[in-house]
Image: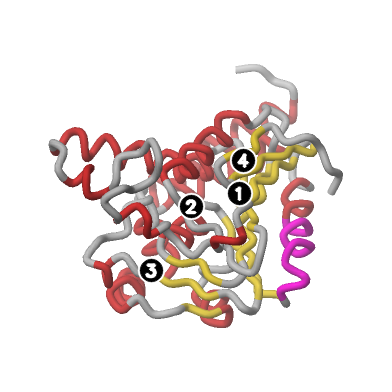
Amino acid sequence: MASFDPLLDKDGVRLTVDDAIATVTLTNPAKRNAQSPALWRALAEAGQLLPGTVRVVLLRAEGKSFSAGLDRQAFTPEGFDGEPSFIDLARRSDAELDAAIAEYQEGFTWWRRSDIVSIAAVQGHAIGAGFQLALACDLRVVADDVQFAMRETSLGLVPDLTGTHPLVGLVGYARALEICATGRFVHAEEAQRTGLASVAVPADQLDAAARDLAGALLAAPRDALIETKALLQGAVGRTYEDQRVAERAAQGRRLRDLAGVGD
């Protein structure tokens, strides 16, 4: 992939764009890409900066670990410079605490936008917030050394960065509960077998595999892919009959578009 000046490069997040493909890279390997409120805001900003030409977004990380999760400094009394510590947040009103968590979640919500398909290329540790960031994407390609774990419950917390909905959707309620409640590692073989990952490859082939998948996605006409993604995203919440109706409406729009017939 060609190298371009980044549209964003701050707080451990870099965004570059090559025509229809955007790449978001976590850039703090010295701390195993541990996450902070500043990083979450940078992720949200990356989503806002995507040009309209972008159809596929690749999420990757520098170093041996995708993300070791939340930077534990958040739980110290001093927290991060210029940020309230989590201890301070806990002392605020319910409304203020809810608003703070909602802001943190914004870095995780845009990856499933209807006009893009997002792919997480995940190597090494993807723990807690790191696991949830990978789950925020539509698809996951993993290295054979990947280690997913949801450690929040073990720490007396819950996964709150939008990871619970996709996890249950991918592996089912019982397995999701077991993964979260035990905090155990999910390795590459299980991730692929249970649907957490589309494919598992040797670590030195991870970036190439993610780019190959991006290229395959770009082969489909954009509007057809958008309609298909919307159909699949809504399928779980619809009855069989409602899904039939949605399919007919989507196909009608596609046929009219291909035939050049206006509404």
Q: Residues within 10 Å of mark 2 (few under 14, many from 20)?
A: many
Q: CA distance from mark 1 to mark 3?
A: 21 Å
Q: Is residue 136 visible?
A: yes
Q: Which residue is mark 1?
A: 118
Relative placement, left or right, of 88 versus 259 is left
Give the overall secondary structure of the magenta segment. helix
Q: Residues within 10 Å of mark 3 (few under 14, many from 20)?
A: many
Contact flag, marks 2 and 1 (Cβ < 8 Å): yes
Residue 135 location (% of width, % of height)? 48, 58
Q: CA distance from mark 2 to mark 1?
A: 9 Å
Tell me what residue is drawn at x 63 percent, y 57 percent: 61
Q: Which residue is mark 3?
A: 150
Disc number for residue 68: none
181 is higher (above) or lower (below) than 256: below
Amino acid under label 3?
Met
Where does the C terminus fall, quadrant-wise?
top right
Q: CA distance from mark 1 to mark 4?
A: 6 Å
* Earlier-in-chain disc, 2 versus 1: 1
Q: Which residue is mark 2?
A: 136
